Image: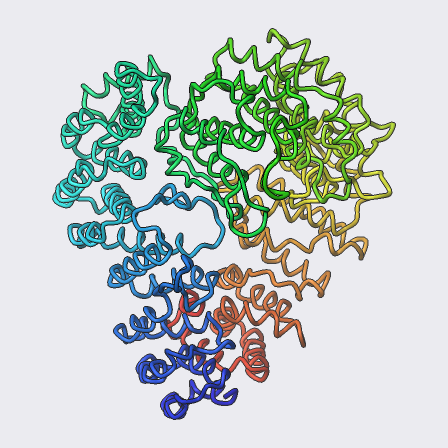
Amino acid sequence: MEYLVRVASAAPKVAVDILLTLKDSDNAWVRRALFTVGATIPASESARLKPVLKAWLESGFGWRTDPREMVDFAVNLLNGGEPKVGRWVANLLFRPGAHGDSLEPDLVLDAYWYQAGLPRIAKAMGTDGFQLTLGWLFEYEKASGRLDGWLFSRPTIRERADTRPDVEDALIDATRDLAVARMTTEPESTVTKLLIVELILARRIAMYATTEALASDEATTNKSSRLINIATQLLFDPVSNDERCRVEFGELARAVARHDPSALDPLVAFIAAGPGPRSSERRERLRRDEDKSEDEIEVLVAEFTERWEHLWLASVGASALPALLAHRLAELDERLGVITDPLRPPMVVTSWAGPNSPLAQDEMAVMSPNELVAHLETWHDHGDGWGPEPSHEGQARQLTALIAASPQSIAGVTGLVRRLRPTYLRAIFSGWAAAFKAGLDLDWDQVAETTRGVLDHGDELHLPREGGDMDDDPDFTWAKQTAVSLLEELVKKADPPRVPPALLARLVDLLIDLAPTEAAWSKYAAEDRESGMDPLTLSLNSQWPIRVRGLAALVSYGPTALWSERARMALLAELERTDLQGASHAVIGENLGRLLNADEHWTESRIADWFGNADGIDRGQQVALSTAIAIHHYHATLFTLLTPAMLAAIALPEPVVAGWHSHNSTPVQRIGEWAVKALVYGHAEWNDSVVTSFFNTVDARDRGAALGHVAWEFMHASTVERSIRDRFASVWDVRIAHVESTGADSAELREFHWVVRSEKFDVEWWLPRLKRVLELDPELAAERYMIGKNIAAAADVDPRAAFDVTKLLVGEGHSRAMALDELSRNAVPIVIARALAADDEPLNSEATAFMNELGEVGHLDLARQVEAVLDGTMTQRDITE
């Protein structure tokens, strides 16, 4: 099999004939070889392997098979003139299937490789693959039980909720991008195909694709007319009156208005129709509340409808609305407050797996507030903590999710602390915090009453504990912690203010006067310091430092706040405690910028106490300093204020204590990054004390890491000012000269590749410096820089230097094999071709010899690739693909 794979490209027909005789083999290496061969030979020969794949459908494709080569096989067919067989193979690999009773779709490829390979398949299929990817998306939703359900994992079609690899996100992206591409030629057909599957998700994709088509340069007058007709049908279809569609609805309406404002005139009738069946559902739910009269119910329904109207009008935007609706939006803005981010997607609620609930969230949602609280009050857990029985904890998690999305679900009910278990009170506080962060209104009197009641309650339970160990809170400790956490969130300064002033004053009193307890401090101080949490994370997860966070938030209002002096005294009193775990010090580091903005003089007078100075820096001060420089971007004022502390930290014989482990730099490296930025921004010279101390005393690897991280930030910047770029270039020149003069510290230059990859510097500048860096430390060539494409492009500018750099990177022995993996795909053929084409006989000879050397170590196709580059039939992109 290994031999067959090596020679298949030279004798593809014979290789396929051999594989056809092995369709009955269950050998994993045989099955792997089929895909390896099929990915590299002409597509016409690869297509002949279809019968073998059919024979293996039941038994699978072998555990040794490389998923990347499986995708390569399909791409080869699609790009090589065999689209029918290519789509068949793609469907084989990417169509999700049902997995028995499980809601986890059955996939041929592992989820990671599925989402990594799908973009390549979609690109190779082009718009002809649109219906296929749409079908895969439908099958995935069906198999996962999400047909027409809320898609909390994808709140907007435009972008993912996060960057983690996800099959569903990959399917949405592929279907979306192909729909957008297809809208340029077949807009009506594309939208029809999306709507016919009757998925709200597909409808949202249709809206997004139409928006993008209207925004494209190809949207001519005639095409715009067709697209506007499609857009208005989408917008004013009653099915689109759905909160899940609101973001895409608003974006599409704005796009339509830029082409033809009059096309949005039907929006008047759309808004007048109200939120559809949701009003009736709300009315029926409220009628179950025996404490509400019909008049009171109608008032609540009217308020709900008005809020809906406000949000949807704001989503379209005043500039796009017909005049009548623009005037109405202005009225609502004045009375209810401006919605600052109307295109924020619907609330995303984290789902949990674990404890079970006797009621699902949607069952809770149809109960009135009184009914829901009565149920929570009277339901009992009769289980023993084993098995899938419902529990208080399971029900509490459903309650949190419900309140996070709809805080009015328990609004108006009093006496919660007396009636409910601390498990449910904890859930309510968590739900209120999530709802508040999402911009939803709370029942403020209920919040204040319940928070006060929990903080004023003893730690002991007032009801018998039920269920197993994790089914019911053992006391009020966790409820009190979530209460303080809620207070910390509510008292944060906001513009415009969100908490009514009178209520804010009550919450401040609770935080300063009622929240502090010696019990909370004692519990925190006794916790295991080896818990694994860094100080900043700990400050978010323990009651005592959470209150310190709240006090810092109160001080951040500045000296004019009514509670300013009380909050300062309370904060300073807590900071006097001997906090060996460092959470309070992390809080100070995190809030340094806010405290300076609130009262510069008061804060500066405490910098030495909080962060250390030339006399030394203790453990707590190290935590404060490392947190501050990790949380804050470089700023000249902070650099100056923290200079004594940074000098003390650099001088420490042991590593600086990190306040936040999640930051990808060590504290000393972060100090170096600030020192480099001070030079780059022109705020410091080489004689600056921090700059001098860092570059003269810190280990060369830490220095190199600091330089490399700044270069990495250059790579991620959209633009870099010329003066800043030039000063950073000077920094590198100084450090290269240092290594040349000392003959040591070459590790300081080990991350120069980020400069190359940043593409912010001219080739004429970085190419000779890269060569010099590699000469100063040949071990650097063993690093996998992923700069092949940059070197290939540089060969057009300076073929000699590009060739020399490539040889240095390829190296010898094991390092050569490692380097070839990336360089052969992105640089080697181009660089050798440019060297052979140069008017330089010595370079021509060296390039020929180098090509022969690489051929001897297994780069068998190199001569053909170089020849293709020379005759213009192959580009760098072709080689990469």
Quadrant of residue 692 within the rendered picture: top right
The quarter in which the C terminus is drawn is bottom left
Relative to 239, say whether 313 is above or below.
Answer: above
Q: Is residue 720 left or right of residue 411?
A: right
Relative to 118, say whether 381 is above or below.
Answer: above
Residue 376, image x, y percentages: 48, 31
Residue plotted at (67% across, 66% down):
782
Residue plotted at (80% across, 43% down):
655
Residue 258, image x, y percentages: 22, 33
Give whichever of 538, 329 is nearer the camera: 538
Quadrant of residue 12 within the rendered picture: bottom left
Tell me if residue 688 can be seen: yes
Give whichever of 58, 801 is nearer the camera: 58
Give whichever of 397, 503 is nearer the camera: 397
Tell me if residue 687 can be seen: no
Residue 752, image x, y percentages: 64, 53
Q: Is residue 65 left or right of residue 184?
A: right
Residue plotted at (69% across, 56% down):
750
Residue 444, image x, y percentages: 47, 17
